[in-house]
């Protein structure tokens, strides 16, 4: 039996503007998806826990089939297509049993799908002794995300595979940077966010007011550059202040709402250095940088959010 | 007896960045300070209502004296110095009785001090038949504000005198533009805001992060330019959308807080086209552009604010 774990991610700075090539900074967080894989005689069994779909069985070769109830197909697709990728590399197939659970909210903008994909591919890589390097795992996982979603950001799967900080910038290849272990409390609104719709909405706003929005995005780019320096200095006050400035711009581009805004101010009033939406917004999660995780978590709870205490981590995918 | 009324003002776009020469748009609102002036034999009596100071009497010539209780001096100063300005022009002095009341919250960032000053000077101008033109009244009122406060924006006294829209921009003289009567609901936090401290705080932020803040201010300048066009088109949706973008930037520069944020989202959830802080922030008021004043006012009330229903007006100082 092989056990692989892969982390989720947050955007410390730069979501949305990254779509237009401005720099962004993603970080792995120590909340993970755990995949336990073992060989068996025949067929493939997937046993999910808290992944919002039921256990399924299908025949080998059914990774792409439609033997599975229609409404489960989408969520299972990340796993089925991950198995298929590995079977394309390893021609001799075996039966498989996969137990999968996650510490990440599904659809909360914390890269749960990337971490499911990376952990599944990594577990099978180990189980079959394929010795694929991390860069290859990240690439395969990105391809799976693209196939399932139509389009994807390579950042999510890269960060989940490598851990640490990922600076994303137009025309530059992704690179892992080491990071101090920053203390983070996430506030989950318990509402999923519709990334595609929100990205489209920002696009329309940018088309309507190009001079206004371009200057805002230039600011976010500057925030990312300065923020990366402050992370490496571990200057919590400045990192937080830059998160807050970034948050205001996310409010400007209409991805904030009352629920998110309350969690953001709840975190700040608890003494957090900074707080902002992470990811697409409109729901999903906020992140807070805080010295006092307990106090910030309580404050988030009082204001109606589900707190998740974590930290930024250098550890990407792990194998036991 | 002469009765003069002078309006308060809101910033539709551009507060704070205007300090650095970026364009801003102020508008007169139909909430007023009312001054009733009459001559009497001797001495000067000031009878304030809801102006947070008590009735006072002093001798002619005591406009600058210290016959008045210390703690009242500051708030009375706008009135005493206004009388002095007029007595400098009109050498033959008379006794005076002034009844003053205002519909504006004091210290709420709606230009209450400017409207007190403009209404007082205008009432005396009429009472003594001095025939000072509006531009002169606006100039005298600005001088009074500068003397009382140490520094002042000529925009407040200009807008209160002239009514309508005032575009404020570095190197250009103030000019009144006509405006459609836009429906506005104000949400007063019932906390005053400390303009001087907030302006200083923004200055420090700008010094720490010049590339970031300068781009944000450039954006606000673009919002003002576009916003002015949309006001003149009476395109309520666009005017509101631009208010919302401006609001996010005000959040970025740290002048927002939980109480203000709640009122802003309360207004938007009631169906307002847009809502934002007006003035220095940190307390004071928000403004909402709305078709349904009753609904927006109720929503503001539910979220802990004091609603004030009004509209943008072309009418500056009036005389009866």
Image (spheres, coloured by chain):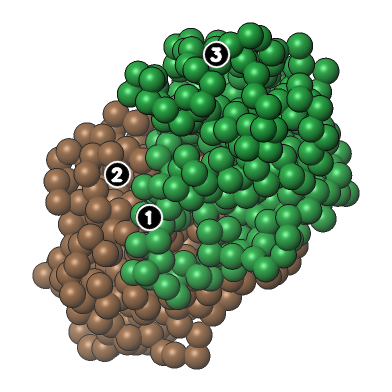
Chain colours: A green, B brown
Please tell me which residue lies in front, A20 or A40: A40
Q: Is residue B211 above or below residue A180?
A: below
State the residue at coordinates (41%, 47%): A196
State the residue at coordinates (44%, 48%): A150
Q: Secondary structure at mark 3?
A: loop
Q: Residues within 10 Å of mark 1 (few under 14, many from 20)?
A: few
Q: x%, y% of residue B118?
A: 33, 71
Please tell me which residue lies in front, B239 or B88: B239
Real-space Cα separation, disc 2 to disc 3, in angstroms: 54 Å
Q: Which mark is residue A43?
A: 3
From the viewer's perspective, is the residue at label 1 or at label 2 nearer? Answer: 1
Is B118 on the left or on the right of A304, as rendered? Answer: left
Please tell me which residue lies in front, A100 or A234: A100
Q: x%, y% of residue A99?
A: 62, 12
Q: Is residue A253 above or below residue B79?
A: above
From the viewer's perspective, is the residue at label 2 or at label 3 nearer? Answer: 3
Q: Secondary structure at mark 2?
A: helix
Q: x%, y% of residue A36?
A: 69, 14
Q: To which chain does the residue with label 1 belong?
A: A
Q: Earlier in the sequence, mark 1 or mark 3?
A: 3
Say which residue label 2 marks.
Answer: B268
Say which residue label 1 marks.
Answer: A200
Is A244 on the left or on the right of B50, as rendered? Answer: right
């Amino acid at each position: 039996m092989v056990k692989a774990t892969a982390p989720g991610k947050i955007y410390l700075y730069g979501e949305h503007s990254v779509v237009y090539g401005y720099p962004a900074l993603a970080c792995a967080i120590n909340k993970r998806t755990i995949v336990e894989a073992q060989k068996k005689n025949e067929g493939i069994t997937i046993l999910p826990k808290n992944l919002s779909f039921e256990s399924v069985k299908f025949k080998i070769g059914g990774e792409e089939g439609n033997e599975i109830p229609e409404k489960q197909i989408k969520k299972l697709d990340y796993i089925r297509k991950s198995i298929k990728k590995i079977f394309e590399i390893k021609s001799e197939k075996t039966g498989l049993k996969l137990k999968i659970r996650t510490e990440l909210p599904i659809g909360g903008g914390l890269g749960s799908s990337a971490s499911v994909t990376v952990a599944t591919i990594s577990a099978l890589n180990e189980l079959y002794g394929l010795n694929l390097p991390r860069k290859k795992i990240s690439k395969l996982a990105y391809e799976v995300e693209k196939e399932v979603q139509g389009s994807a950001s390579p950042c999510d799967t890269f960060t989940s595979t490598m851990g640490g900080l990922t600076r994303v910038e137009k025309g530059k290849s992704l690179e892992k940077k080491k990071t101090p272990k920053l203390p983070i409390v996430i506030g989950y609104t318990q509402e999923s966010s519709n990334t595609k719709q929100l990205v489209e909405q920002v696009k329309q706003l940018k088309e309507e007011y190009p001079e206004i929005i371009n200057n805002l995005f230039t600011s976010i780019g500057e925030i990312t550059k300065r923020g990366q320096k402050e992370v490496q200095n571990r200057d919590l006050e400045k990192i937080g202040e830059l998160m807050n400035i970034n948050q205001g711009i996310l409010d400007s581009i209409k991805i904030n709402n009352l629920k998110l805004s309350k969690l953001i101010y709840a975190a700040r009033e608890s003494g957090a250095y900074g707080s902002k939406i992470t990811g697409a917004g409109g729901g999903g999660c906020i992140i807070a940088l805080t010295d006092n995780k307990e106090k910030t978590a309580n404050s988030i709870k009082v204001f109606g959010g589900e707190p998740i205490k974590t930290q930024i981590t250098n550890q990407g995918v792990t194998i036991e």
